[in-house]
Image: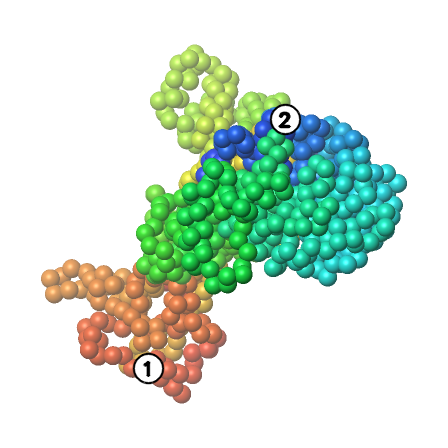
Amino acid sequence: MSGPRLSYGGSRTSTGPTKKKVTVSYIIRDSESTLNCSGVTQLRADPHARHLFSAGRDSIIRCWNTLDCAHVSSFDHHTDWVNDIVLCKNSSILLSASSDTTLKVWNVPKATCLSTLKNHKDYVRCLAYSSARDLAASAGLDKIISLWDVNTLTELSSFNNTVTTNTLTGHKDSIYSLAMNDAGSVLVSGSTDKVIRVWDPISHSPIMKLKGHSDNVRSLVLSQDGTRCVSASSDGTVRLWSLKQQRCVETFRNHDDGVWALAVDEDFKHVYSGGRDMKVFVTDLCSSTSDYLFMESASILSLCLDPVEKKALWVSTTNSHINKWRCSDFAELASQVEGVTEGEEEEEEEEEEEEDEEATDVDEPLPLHRKPLATIPGGSGIVDYQVLGNKTQIITKDNKGRLVLWDVLHACKERDLEGSDMHKAADLMQDKFFVPNWFSVEVKTGVLTIKLSESDCFAAWVMGCNANLGNTEELKLNLGALILKALFEHWNRQKCDEAKAILTSIPDLMTLTEEVGSKWRNLGQHLGIPNSRLEEIQFYCDQDIKHCREQVLKEWLKEFDDQGERHTTDLVDALNQLGLRLAADKLNHYCKADTSNVGLNRVFFSVPDHTPVVLQEAGDCGTTYYRFLCGYGSNPHEVRSLETHCPMWVTDIVCMHNLPPHPKIKFSVCKHPKDAKGQSLEQLSGLDVLTIVKVMEYCYTKMYGNKGRMMEDGTKMKPHECMDIVCLDQVLDPELDLRTVKHTIWKGGGDPKLFYRLKDEYPSSDKPSNQNTVMSSTQNTVMSSTQNTVMSSTQNTVMSSTQNTVMSS
């Protein structure tokens, strides 16, 4: 008969995605971020609701009211740059493409993600949509175009997101641009292979190739009848193509650098272009004339005509704000050449005078507009960072030059810092202890993303007194294990509840201890139940032994649930101590390994509930398996997804409470060469967080025995009062650990060599002689096989048992 078992996911024998290497990332940010904190890659306007949607490099899509530029809602579920968005089905559905390799389907009114599509194997760069056929197309760096039935996509859910798609292949390199007419009869694609390909999305077949650009085709727009196309390229040109003639009919060379964005009016008469040179031009496709409209403050990523206010153009750049500019028709442009409109006359005259004075080239053309009509403000994004030596704090610098100190363990901002020199601020806050790197940092999205991998996550053990955590002074803490427990705290709590449910569901749990008989009180004492509570049980059960026994077990289960520190092994041990081996064996048979360790171990701190956690395939463009918020890890759907995707190296710590290995350091000790008198180095080993004061205590005991060295008044001297430990002529701080000594003082190869000496024999003016003398011919026994190890019975002070581990059961 096999007992019930708990499933924790991440099985080593699984053939699913967890077989691949999986990283865990979490994002440190505010609970509600209503402003873009990085560049805005795409803009789309909803003509029905006067809303503007922005796709951000901070991984969030936001909706804005175009009347007052107020924030309406946020769509937050991607884990990397959102490169493109399209509105579908009368703006009720939104599709988004991201560098996290996924497409997402959104319910616009509810601002919720309906499903995630993982058809692409690399960054998804662009989208196109046909309203007449409800057909969407996506493409990216994997060189494939996927066609999607939007009606099918709207029926998907997080539980059912399986969908078939048609693919178009032919490009030899990454695809950066797509366009499709509303009828869905023509699809065009542009690539870094410098070719524009024309497709029939109905028959899924290629029609033609258009060649002429000398660099990446970054943007495309297509006429509604599918006969003309305008392309923008990194070669700095905008080209007009005739699909009937299969050739380029006009080339516009207005820009000084790559052209990245296009917008065209409904009549396909005027095309607006912008790019790396920050300039926006309007070109009349009929007369082939162009005018310089305005200049932005950064490289332009997207242009979007306001569908209601026809003479307004929304512009996004690599900065976080979005500007609304006037884009007058040609009749108005002619009048503005002679004199600016009344509304901006005084301001623009003043600006013109200032700019004319600064202009170095009198022939340099000036833009027709100098100031935007309105601005959607942007926030500040992180552009640089430095991890402090304690590996629990990070200093960041944003695009406005401001410095902020962040707490990695608590996933929150600590405080703002004065000044603008990040490295100087970091130098003032550096710690004397060396802590190995246990995480990596990304600021690609303008916010702090902390990445944990199996190879590095458990590298950093520290003493509690150096971790700035309460009541942990004598504990050895693994920083990676601590943060994993905090990130998955709610999931772990769900597992604890499941364990309790299993225990209470065992049919004869209450009969397992029938042989306890009158020993029920002893059982309760062994389980840690207070005597006062045992008295109450006896009173209320009217001394009925069976009822008393059952109440003791129920009390134990209640504490298992409330405290999260009870284990089934507690009950098994208690039964064994009472000599009731049959009952203990029965319970072990039911609970096996899974429930023997599932009680929540101690969680020293919590992270904010709004902290996003991402499980992702390792690599630069690894697939995102799952994303959730810390505070929702106990939701049934979250639990199922975590069980499917959570890697074993995480579940081992979070659910099974297995200890990560604790690294040791080999070192040698000897009397200072001046007093060595032929003594050899003694080879020892200890935990890397072993402090020098512990080494000092060992050497002190070796010199003076248990009695120690006495002062003149008869009191016993402490080791640090009469002794120094020296490494490479440097007296070591007793608070330093072996790891710090090895990496910051010893630095060389081989094991560190430590020398002990008495302070009164080495006054401060007497510099110790070079330790190299220890290698003299009389000391060649340093590497002899008779060298003692740190684990000998007389050296217990080196591995003092007072340094309990935080993860012990």
In this rendering, does residue 611 appear at all?
no
Residue 473 makes an appearance in the image: yes
The residue that mark 2 highlights is 48
Question: Which residue position holds label 1?
Answer: 770
| Corner quadrant of residue 167 | top right
Q: Is residue 70 above or below residue 714?
A: above
Q: How many neighbours does mark 1 have within 10 angstroms: few (below 14), some (14-19), or many (20 or more)?
A: few
Residue at the image point whose x is 60% and y is 23% from the top: 505
Q: Nearer the N terminus, badge 1 or badge 2?
A: 2
Q: Observer-nearest residue: 557 or 32?
A: 32
**Tag 1: amino acid:** Asn
Q: Are marks 1 and 2 in contact (CB under 8 Å)?
A: no
Horizontal and vertical percent position of residue 649: 59, 48
Query: In which quadrant will I find the N terminus?
Result: top right
The structure residue drawn at horizontal position 63% and vertical position 29%, both measured from the top left corner, is: 47
Residue 771, position in %: x, y?
Answer: 34, 80
Instruction: Report the front residue among 784 and 603.
Output: 603
**Between 185 and 699, the one nearer to me in the picture:** 185
Q: Residues within 10 Å of mark 2 (few under 14, many from 20)?
A: few
Residue situated in front as seen by the camera: 224 or 110: 224
Q: Amino acid at mark 2?
A: His
Q: Secondary structure at mark 1?
A: loop
State the CA–CA distance, disc 1 to disc 2: 83 Å
Q: Could you say which disc has been placed on residue 661 in the image? A: none
Q: Could you say which quadrant of the image residue 501 lies in? A: top right
Q: Looking at this view, name the residue that lies furthest to the left.
A: 713
